[in-house]
Image (tube, coloured by chain):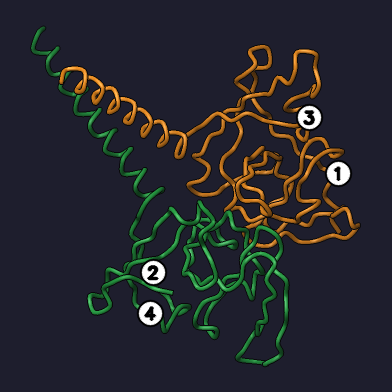
Amino acid sequence: MGSGSLLWNLTKKYLTVGVIGLTITDRYASIVPVRGGSMSPTFNPRTNTVLGSLDDRVLIEKFCLAKYKFSHGDVVVFRSPSEHKQKLIKRIIGLPGDWIGTPQNDVIKIPEGHCWVEGDNPASSMDSRTFGPIPLGLVQGRATTIVWPPQRVCQVERRILQDRFPPSA
Amino acid sequence: MNAWKSIAKDAFTQTCLVVKFLGFLHLTNNYLISPTLVYGPSMLPTLNLTGDVLLVEHVSHRFQKVGPGDVVLVRSPLDPTKMVTKRVVGMEGDRINFLPDPSITDICRTIMVPKGHIWIQGDNMYASCDSRHYGPVPYGLVQGKLFFRVWPPSSFGSFGQ
């Protein structure tokens, strides 16, 4: 009887911690690993080291989801439009109303409620150049800080690529 | 001194209780069932103009159990702070015939729904802003499936296809 109630107490404790943890990661902040070299050199500058893959861990804040206010150069995590289970991390290049040059050499206007995302490493990145502008509703959070490995702890800075915009008339 | 200690302990216990409660509330609201108020003309014969209260379940869309005919809650692609309620018409790979604007022309257009997307339409095709305007929407925007109507009481009951 005594061990049973002990087990029940332990289960209850784990459940509570799990529920509170889930709430925090869903609503406020979470830490995710970044895989692949599509955001190099911002994340994972060396993809194949001798030590194996040392993935960067990044702190994602979710307060921006209350109003979906983003600015140019923010690094965001979003669900892939073609594969909803997959999450991608890219930099916002264009916001609604911007005109942007596509790889097909034409200029499109980003529709209402959408954004244009690109990786920092254009050579190996699956981004808006393949699937076009994405709805802002797919965005899951904004990357603020690299928290792991220790020698790479730093803020994720915003970077605006001016050359992506066509010269204004 | 002892009195302060007991007060602090009490406050801590109460805070823990509130945090636990909020955690469980978040869990049920986002992963199991939540109520929602639907209004507007876009789903008219099915849902009333003035506002119905329905229950949304957040389980089946995580297991890809959403199919044509289901009424789903979708984050609007035009304004991410808003939710829209529409009926799923086609899944990825389906061919959809639709009238871009039935009140003006009756020219039919055909589109193939791309991978990972769904085609959503309102039941009232004359007053609905849906996939006919903004195209297929990514499956990742689906937030839940409507399955039970609470209000008005005359149509209380499960909400079929």
Say whether mark 2 and mark 4 are on the same chain.
yes
User: Is disc 3 surrounded by few (<14), some (14 to 19) or many (20+) residues within 10 Å?
Assistant: some
Q: Is residue B77 above or below residue A23?
A: below
Say whether mark 1 and mark 4 are on the same chain.
no
The residue tagged 2 is: B38
Residue B90 is situated, as x and y percent measured from the top left of the image, at 61, 71
The residue tagged 3 is: A40
The residue tagged 4 is: B49
Say whether mark 4 and mark 3 are on the same chain.
no
Which numbered mark, 4 or 1, is in the foreground of this view?
A: 4
Q: Colour of chain A?
A: orange
Q: Colour of chain B?
A: green
Give the Cα separation between the discs numbered 4 and 2. 9 Å
Q: Mark 4 belongs to which amino acid?
A: Leu
Q: Which mark is residue A163?
A: 1
Q: Secondary structure at mark 3?
A: loop
Residue projecting furthest to the right: A105
